[in-house]
Every structure is written in structure tokens, then in C-alpha cells.
Image: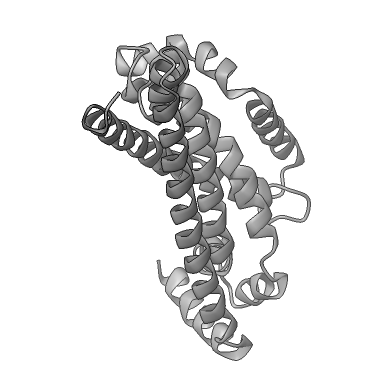
């Protein structure tokens, strides 16, 4: 296969992969962020302590995380068809990608939020701040560098999942590698897709690490006193709301 024949295939495959991973990431963050925070809030000593709810949520997350992605695709075929009207193509692949990524991201969020200084939480509570104020003004902003790093990790994992989704006709670079590289013995094309995936992952990892480090330095230079003054103003705003 010549380069002129490979180029349109690779261009479309790259776009399909970015499309699937992009939408799956948005859904995973939207679903995993509140779920991870809820795991922290409902834990022992949390602001919304509820041991039973915490155990149930944690167990559901653990079961979802333990399921191999290729099995998850098959298990969700009916659900995927009900939402998208099909089980083939990039739109259909977004469903299992998002479902698989939500519990994965939720656990990363839980770890990130647990690292927040408890003294800041206590300070906001002492100022009269409610749970929503603590989440919005302390837990999320203070854990933001770790949350960005967690999002980067999730994106990298989703790229790998999207390659596996290619085995069931979801499109993307994984589909090109299977259909052409493996089934048609186009070894050169297969290695090109591997190289493209490696470059994309490296760029995403670099951007994510840079953003996380920048936010960490900015937060680290703020100091405790300015933070408490900001929290006091934020708490007053939260009480007004």
C-alpha cells in the first residue's frame, strides 16, 4: 500500500480516535468527578458521612473497574443500541468507553481529593461554610493539579481502550491496525498507527503534566494566609447563596 493510499485512511482514523476519546473524556469527567467527591464525603469522618452508601458506591465502582474492556463492550451492546441505535461505529464506541472510564476516573478523583489539607476544610466550616461551599471553594480548587493529572491518565487509558474498540468495528486507529495491519498483512501501516498513537499519547501526557505543574506552583506560592482570606470571602459568598 502506497502513502497516498494510507494518508486518507490514517487521517480519518485519527479523527475518529480523537472524536471518541474527546467525548468519552467529557462524559467520564462529568460523571466521575461528582462520584469521586461523593466517595470522600460519605466516608467515615466525611462531611456527609454515610457508611452504607459509601460501601455500596465503592463496591459498584470496584465491580465496574474490574471488568475487562472488551467484555464491557459486549455486555453493553443492548444499552449501546438503545442509546445510539447501533452497535458499530464511533458513536456506539463512546458508550462503553465512557461507562468504563467513569469509575476509573472516580477513583483517581477520590485519591486527589483526599490529599487536600483538612485544616482548610475545618477553617471553612468554622466560618460557617456548608458542604457545597467546601466542595466548590476548597476540595476542587485545592486538588485541581491532581485532578488534571488524573484527567490526563484517563485520556491515555481511553486511547488504549479506543484501540481495543476497533476490534468490534468502532473505527479509529485500532480498527486500521486490525483490518489492514493484521488481517491484510499491511505491517508497515500497522507500525505507522502504533507510531501515531505513541506521538499522540506523548503530547497529551506532556500537556497534562505541564498544566498540573503550573497550577501546583501557582497554588504553592499562594501561602496559607492569602488562602484563608480568600476562603473567608468565598464562605461569605456561599452563605449569601
| 174 relative to 10 in the view: left or right | right
Q: Please provide percent x and percent y for residue 164.
A: 50, 24
Q: Residue at 49% x, 45% y: name it.
A: 198
Quadrant of the rendering where the N terminus is positioned: top left
| 181 relative to 133 in the view: left or right | left
Q: Which of these two is toward me, 27 or 51?
A: 27
Image quadrant assignment for residue 86: top left
| Furthest residue toward top | 78
Q: Please provide percent x and percent y for residue 101.
A: 53, 36
Q: Please provide percent x and percent y for residue 44.
A: 78, 50
Q: Is residue 82 above or below residue 39?
A: above
Image quadrant assignment for residue 106: top right
Q: Is residue 227 above or below residue 36?
A: below
Is any atom of residue 41 visible in this view? no
Q: Which of these two is toward me, 103 or 229?
A: 103
| 27 relative to 42 in the view: left or right | left
Q: Residue at 70% x, 31% y: name it.
A: 62
| 63 relative to 191 in the view: left or right | right
Q: Which of these two is toward me, 117 or 13?
A: 13
Q: Please provide percent x and percent y for residue 138.
A: 56, 69
Q: Is residue 59 above or below residue 83?
A: below
| Furthest residue toward front | 2
Quadrant of the rendering where the C terminus is positioned: bottom left
Q: Is residue 10 above or below residue 1?
A: below
Is any atom of residue 51 visible in this view? yes
Amino acid at each position: 500500500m502506497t502513502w497516498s493510499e494510507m494518508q486518507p485512511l490514517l487521517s480519518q482514523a485519527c479523527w475518529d480516535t480523537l472524536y471518541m476519546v474527546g467525548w468519552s473524556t467529557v462524559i467520564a469527567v462529568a460523571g466521575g468527578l461528582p462520584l469521586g467527591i461523593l466517595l470522600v464525603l460519605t466516608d467515615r469522618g466525611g462531611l456527609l458521612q454515610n457508611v452504607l452508601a459509601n460501601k455500596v458506591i465503592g463496591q459498584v465502582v470496584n465491580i465496574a473497574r474490574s471488568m475487562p474492556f472488551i467484555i464491557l463492550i459486549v455486555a453493553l451492546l443492548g444499552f449501546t443500541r438503545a442509546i445510539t441505535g447501533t452497535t458499530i461505529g464511533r458513536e456506539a464506541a463512546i458508550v462503553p468507553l465512557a461507562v468504563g472510564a467513569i469509575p476509573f476516573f472516580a477513583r483517581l478523583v477520590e485519591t486527589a481529593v483526599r490529599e487536600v489539607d483538612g485544616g482548610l476544610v475545618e477553617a471553612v466550616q468554622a466560618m460557617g461554610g456548608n458542604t457545597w461551599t467546601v466542595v466548590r471553594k476548597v476540595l476542587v480548587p485545592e486538588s485541581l493539579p491532581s485532578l488534571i493529572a488524573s484527567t490526563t491518565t484517563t485520556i491515555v487509558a481511553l486511547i488504549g481502550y479506543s484501540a481495543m474498540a476497533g476490534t468490534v468495528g468502532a473505527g479509529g486507529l485500532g480498527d486500521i491496525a486490525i483490518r489492514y495491519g493484521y488481517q491484510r498483512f499491511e505491517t508497515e501501516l500497522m507500525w505507522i498507527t502504533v507510531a501515531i498513537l505513541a506521538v499522540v499519547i506523548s503530547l497529551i501526557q506532556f500537556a497534562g503534566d505541564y498544566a498540573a505543574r503550573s497550577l501546583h506552583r501557582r497554588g504553592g506560592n499562594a501561602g496559607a494566609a492569602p488562602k484563608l482570606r480568600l476562603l473567608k470571602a468565598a464562605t461569605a459568598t456561599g452563605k449569601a447563596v
